Amino acid sequence: MPSTIPPHPGISFTAPLLADGYGTVTALGPSCSAASNALLHKPVLLLPMRGWASAPEGPENLGKDFAIIGASTGSDVGTAQEWVVVHEDEVVAAPEHLTPAEGAALPLVGLTGWRALVSKGGPGNAERGSNVLITGIGGGVALQVLQFAVARGCSVWVTSGDKGKIERAVGMGAKGGVVYKEKGWEKELAGLLPAERPYLDLVVDGAGGEVVGKTVKLLKPGGVISCYGMTVGPKMDWLMQAVLKHIELKGSTMGSKAEFRDMVEFVREHKIRPVVSRVVKGLDNLEGIDSLFEDMKTGRQFGKLVIQIDAEGDSSPKL
């Protein structure tokens, strides 16, 4: 990770790592509601954060109660462990069509992508017929946004540094894409947009950098840039041209418990299967786990990287 990007706040070296989790409910506490009885011995997805119930603007008490689980001072829970004890409101039934690895790949990227596309995209910008650009295809969030947008009937365009990843995205329903490493890629993208709708309604971006300058001419007046991360650097330029065009730049991170439930239900309804790049088995398989970090370092992954906790079975894979 570039040294210019500040570290994630509240890192803990004592709490278990990792935020995404799929597992089986093995026991219920004495205070659990009757509704939770239906989850006993059933597969569930673990909410990847705490302290955000439903407020659409952001966490109700940001800075005090909100925390992403996994290596966080705000939570004692992480998914790199065999057992966790959580409140009954922090799990939802896993969609029945998902494999354990697919279920493990969904929570964090699904919630982040859902909020960036649907909640932050705004009315009319992520609907049937809308033109949506997703940058950095191949990453977990970007691929999840792609799947959501295609299922909603959007026309999706992508960028990547790898032509092969663009081709795979097209195979998943994208209309096309461009290599962002090539000079003038925004002009190439302009030539790909349909004549009857030659503009972008929405850009969903996780890189930052030059995204405003590269897309401002492509966006419709009042178009939206939904930014959920800045892997290129911790800031981006805001151009007067964007002001004159009434472009909206919206920051987006994670999502609420209500959005999580909406997202999981959408996945269930549309039978969406998160993209799993690779699975390694065994929490003590340090060599295999290190190789997953190498995949991220070199950008080889296309989708999520999953650790299956039980090396001998297929239960509780988590990442």
Image: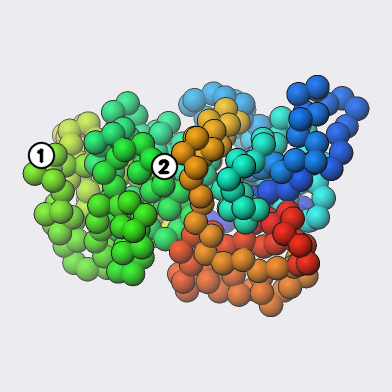
Asked whether the residues under the numbered discs 2 and 1 touch, taking CB atoms below 8 Å apart as contact, a structural biologist would say: no
308 displayed left or right of 180: right
| Residue furthest left as drawn | 195
Label 2: state its secondary structure. Answer: helix
Indicate whether 78 appears above or below 253. Answer: below
Q: Residue at x 10, y 39 (%)?
A: 196
Q: Quadrant of the C terminus?
A: bottom right
Q: CA distance from mark 2 to mark 1?
A: 23 Å
User: Which badge, 2 or 1, comes first in the chain's sequence?
Assistant: 2
Q: Nearer the viewer, residue 69 or 286?
A: 286
Q: Nearer the viewer, residue 56 or 308?
A: 308
Q: Residue at x 54, y 38 (%)?
A: 268
Using a 10 Å C-alpha cutoff, classify the residue at mark 2 as few (fewer than 14 neighbours), some (14 to 19) or many (20 or more): many
| Residue furthest right as drawn | 30
The label number, if any, that marks residue 196 in the structure image: 1
Q: Residue at x 91, y 27 (%)?
A: 30
The residue to which callout 2 is attached is 148
6 displayed left or right of 38: left
Q: Residue at x 54, y 33 (%)?
A: 265
How far across and down, in percent of the image, does residue 242 sit? Answer: 21, 39
Q: Nearer the viewer, residue 244 or 219?
A: 219
What amino acid type should be assigned to the residue bearing mark 1?
A: Glu
Label 1: state its secondary structure. Answer: loop
23 displayed left or right of 237: right
| Residue furthest bottom as drawn | 287
Using a 10 Å C-alpha cutoff, classify the residue at mark 1 as few (fewer than 14 neighbours), some (14 to 19) or many (20 or more): few
How far across and down, in percent of the image, does residue 128 sit? Answer: 28, 34
The label number, if any, that marks residue 312 in the structure image: none
What amino acid type should be assigned to the residue bearing mark 2?
A: Phe
**Residue 284, image quadrant:** bottom right
Residue 233 seen anywhere in this rendered image of the structure:
no
How far across and down, in percent of the image, does residue 177 sit? Answer: 25, 58
